[in-house]
Image (cartoon, rainbow, N blue to C red):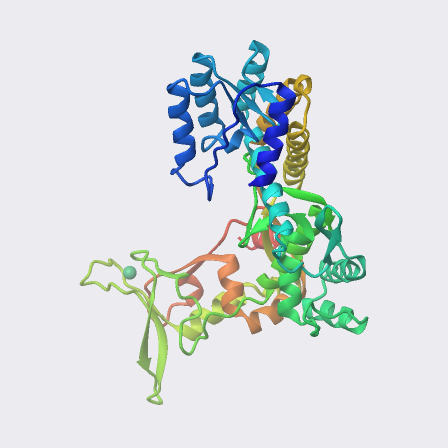
């Protein structure tokens, strides 16, 4: 590219290097590509003693990564050929310069800063060529300045994004948020009305919190933290996470019932034969009116090795298990929500920003700042590496009572709280309470612990 060639030429002039300048380029460079004909040719030229100095625009323009680059620079140095990079300004000629160059190789984040420098560069190129950089997300606009096109927050739209987010965080539905902002005159990018689906997509888009993403995946730095553009944050990352948590809660609350008693047994996968521990199957028997009535039955039976195969009419077992929850029928529905520990998430994001900032500084740093910055970067990276984000289980109160919820979504309710229901073989005249054992999922933490501990 002509722009790179002129950058290199002026650097050659600054360095006062003498001789003919030959420009080598690998077309269609990509990090994954191993075919680098120009790089291979350069190595041969150095080996053959045809080159007195190598000037590169940035380190990642040689080799597939910094390691490759340093190996090349070291081999060249052994033959008295020094390497100079324009961006950042480095050289392998002096002992101190070579140390600094190697130091950079030790720090993988320096690699990251080179990669982002390359991305910025190629975006500039694309803009120069008049190519589109994609339509901006709602809430953003592209601003054309003399030095190129830049994505910025469009405040007249961003305020609606914030308002919709707040409604959802406060417990409102996406549809309620959509209606509110529609009422205030907000329209989608295409001029349409907001509905659950398009507003949901927007609120889930990490771009509104300035997080870089590609094809649905967050762009992470080498420490595994998301890369964040602070000037493109309509919401802070913490606010965005609150929105996601609120959306998850709503989703959890309206997950569909998987089946009903008539077609599939309510306690499918939960009811087990106490004799052999197998999941009980659906069977049926004719009642005294001749209608077939569903029944839970041990799938093995005596012949296949169950010492005490059990069976029980479906309505009896289902009713008994549902009645077990009577003490909490009047209490509000509790949803179990799992999320990352907020403190460690915040710490990880803080470190990511720090790493980002240092990497950015490193990209344009003077030679005497590089060592200090590199050390800071290593420390921040170590801290990020040693950070463990733990999952926290939280119980959240929903609207409506358990009684209402069980009526509407019995399967979902039971599979949330019941680990298994053991059914023991017995006669029809035995009280069924003596034949059924309900084992709840671990309840140490959840709000009903007291209710059921008393019962047990
Ligand atoms: Zn059995």
Quadrant assignment, res 12 = top right
Ligand 1 quadrant?
bottom left
Observer-nearest residue: 115 or 80?
80
Q: Position of residue 317 (x, y in %)?
A: 43, 69
At 21% across and 63% down in the image, what residue appears? Answer: 302
Observer-nearest residue: 220 or 304?
220
- The residue positioned farthest toward the front in the image shown: 20
Q: Is residue 49 left or right of residue 167?
A: left
Observer-nearest residue: 120 or 157?
120
Residue 86 shows in the view: yes
Figure check: 83 above or below 313 = above
Quadrant in the picture for the N terminus? top right
Figure check: 46 above or below 5 = above
Q: Position of residue 155 (x, y in %)?
A: 80, 57
- The residue positioned farthest toward the left in the image shown: 303
Quadrant assignment, res 186 = bottom right
Figure check: 26 above or below 415 = above
Residue 116 shows in the view: no
At 35% across and 74% down in the image, what residue appears? Answer: 295
**Count of numbered marks:** 0
Q: Position of residue 178 (x, y in %)?
A: 72, 69
At 66% across and 35% down in the image, what residue appears? Answer: 347
Quadrant assignment, res 365 = top right
């Amino acid at each position: 590219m002509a722009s790179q060639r002129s950058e290199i030429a002026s650097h050659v002039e600054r360095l006062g290097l003498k001789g003919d300048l030959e420009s080598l380029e690998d077309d269609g460079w990509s990090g994954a590509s191993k075919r680098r004909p120009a790089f291979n040719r350069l190595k041969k030229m150095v080996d053959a003693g045809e080159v007195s100095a190598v000037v590169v625009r940035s380190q990642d323009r040689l080799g597939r990564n910094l390691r490759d680059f340093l190996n090349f620079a070291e081999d060249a140095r052994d033959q008295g050929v020094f390497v100079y990079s324009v961006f950042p300004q480095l050289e392998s000629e002096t002992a101190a310069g070579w140390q600094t160059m190697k130091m950079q190789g030790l720090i993988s984040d320096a690699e990251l800063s080179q990669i982002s420098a390359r991305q910025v560069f190629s975006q500039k190129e694309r803009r120069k060529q008049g190519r589109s950089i994609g339509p901006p997300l709602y809430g953003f606009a592209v601003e054309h300045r003399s030095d190129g096109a830049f994505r910025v927050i469009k405040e007249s739209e961003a305020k609606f994004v914030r308002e919709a987010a707040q409604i959802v965080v406060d417990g409102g539905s996406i549809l309620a948020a959509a209606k509110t902002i529609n009422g205030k005159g907000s329209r989608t990018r295409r001029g349409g009305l907001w509905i659950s689906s398009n507003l949901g997509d927007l609120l889930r888009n990490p771009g509104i919190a300035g997080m870089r993403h590609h094809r649905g995946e967050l762009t992470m730095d080498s420490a595994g933290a998301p890369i964040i553009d602070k000037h493109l944050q309509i919401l802070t990352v913490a606010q965005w996470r609150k929105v996601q948590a609120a959306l998850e809660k709503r989703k959890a609350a309206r997950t569909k019932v998987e089946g009903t008693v008539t077609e599939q047994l309510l306690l499918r996968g939960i009811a087990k034969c106490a004799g052999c521990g197998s999941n009980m199957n659906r069977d049926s028997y004719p009642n005294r009116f001749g209608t077939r009535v569903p029944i839970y039955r041990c799938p093995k039976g005596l012949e296949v090795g169950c010492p005490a195969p059990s069976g029980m009419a479906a309505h009896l077992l289902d009713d008994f298990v549902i009645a077990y929850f009577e003490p909490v029928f009047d209490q509000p529905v509790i949803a179990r929500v799992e999320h990352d520990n907020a403190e460690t998430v915040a710490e990880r994001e803080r470190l990511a920003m720090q790493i980002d900032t240092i990497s950015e500084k490193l990209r344009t740093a003077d030679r005497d700042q590089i060592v200090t910055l590199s050390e800071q970067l290593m420390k921040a990276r170590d801290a990020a590496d040693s950070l463990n984000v733990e999952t926290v289980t939280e119980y959240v109160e929903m609207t409506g009572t358990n009684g209402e919820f069980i009526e509407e979504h019995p399967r979902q309710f039971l599979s949330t709280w019941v680990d298994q229901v053991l059914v023991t073989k017995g006669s029809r005249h035995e009280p069924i309470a003596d034949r059924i054992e309900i084992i709840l999922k671990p309840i140490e933490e959840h709000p009903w612990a007291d209710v059921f501990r008393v019962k047990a």
